Amino acid sequence: MVKTGDLMKNSKKAAIIGFGGMGQRHYKAYQKIGVEVVAIADLLSDKIREIVPEFSADGVYKDFRDVIRRDDIDIISIVTNGPTHAPFTIAASDAGIKNIMCEKPMATRLSDAQAIIDTARKNRTRVAVNHTRRHSTTYARLRELIRGGVIGDIRHIYFHCGSTGIGNHAIHFFDTARLLTGSEPEWAVGFLDKTGTPNPRGKQFIDPGGYGIIQFRNGTRFMFDMSEDTGVQYTFQIAGTYGRIIIDELNDEWMIRARNGELRKLPLTRYGSDMEKIPFASDGPFDIVDLTSRGLEELVSGKPVSCTPEDGKKSLEMVTALHLSDEAGNTRIGFPLIGAALDKEVRIA
């Protein structure tokens, strides 16, 4: 059997805009699927060949506009910092590049996210946002188990992580909550940290930690806490009417326990009832390069896109709502956001 990567080898060509840590992961992801990277742009262009000495000097650029003028690019990865994602994605689409992978957040304003959606439709560009869990076969299997009632109906989701920005990390799990519940947010309340902790990517970025709740239309309560007073690995928990799922991605530990059989007929107030352990294991340790490669392969091979620009906008909308709530004295903010909220900037790196 011929592998997808073998079919693509020497036939598709890629470009990467931004070559920090994540840009380097995209480079490895393209290698994994057999797509040749022919152009890389970064403001620190001199460092590109220090990182990948084998890369041709003819493909090194400082200005991304020189890359999108090329006529041999089949797919491009936008892996710069957040504020440039929208203008670079729009420019690449307008330049005629038909497949674009944009890192999250897809924009720092909802109006800019909508501009990406509108431009992609106009130009018939395939755009994906790299919320990596959308490409995970483990999460796909878990979603099917949830839909099959393994823990009953999802009622509560809890995400905790040590000190990090809501837009930098929690945004992924906001998207995952939409994926697993099949529901949309109804309202949000946020409490953002006021520590002023410098962003490691630069003082121009403001992405505080904090905590809050997002209520989904199907009744699911999503509670998160990534306040800047802990320094521990993240965990993700999902509670249903009859069971619980605990996910520790970094240590590759997945646990499902649920009431089964006659125990489901008992009142919910019998919270001490036995919960059977349901066999479940991941398809392998969490691997950003592998998951990114799956998203890139979807794009370049014409498969349906797992994380669309519309999905990317929804996750950004939840981050924006939490900022608006905090600024308004922790009031409830309803979805969808409208009016001036669409131009609210969240300066996520």
Image (cartoon, rainbow, N blue to C red):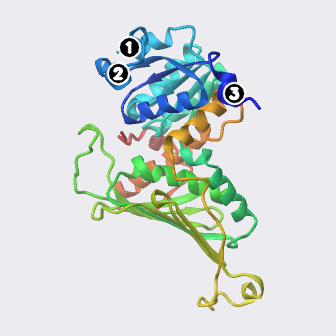
Q: Is residue 209 shown above or below 305?
A: below
Counting from the top left corner in percent of width and height, residue 201 is at 29, 39
Q: Quadrant of the N terminus?
A: top right
- Horizontal side of 276 relative to 286 (left or right) equals right
Asked whether, in this view, residue 341 is left or right of residue 30, the answer is left
Residue at image mark 1: 61
Residue visible at 66% across and 22% down?
8
Mark 2 vs mark 3: in front: 2
Q: Is residue 77 above or below residue 56?
A: below
Mark 2, residue position: 48
Task: State left or right for residue 120 relative to residue 199.
Answer: right
State the image coordinates of residue 166 (x, y, percent, origin top left).
40, 52
Under circle 1, the secondary element is: strand
Q: Quadrant of residue 34?
A: top right
Decide: is 300 above or below 177: above
Are there few (<14), some (14-19), or many (20+) residues within 10 Å of tag 3?
few
Q: Which residue is at 61% across, 41% downward?
A: 307
Name the residue: 35% across, 21% down.
Answer: 48
> Marks 1 and 2, how far apart in space?
9 Å
Circle 3: residue type: Ser
Which comes sooner in the sequence, label 1 or label 3? 1
Q: Read off the residue under disc 3.
A: 301
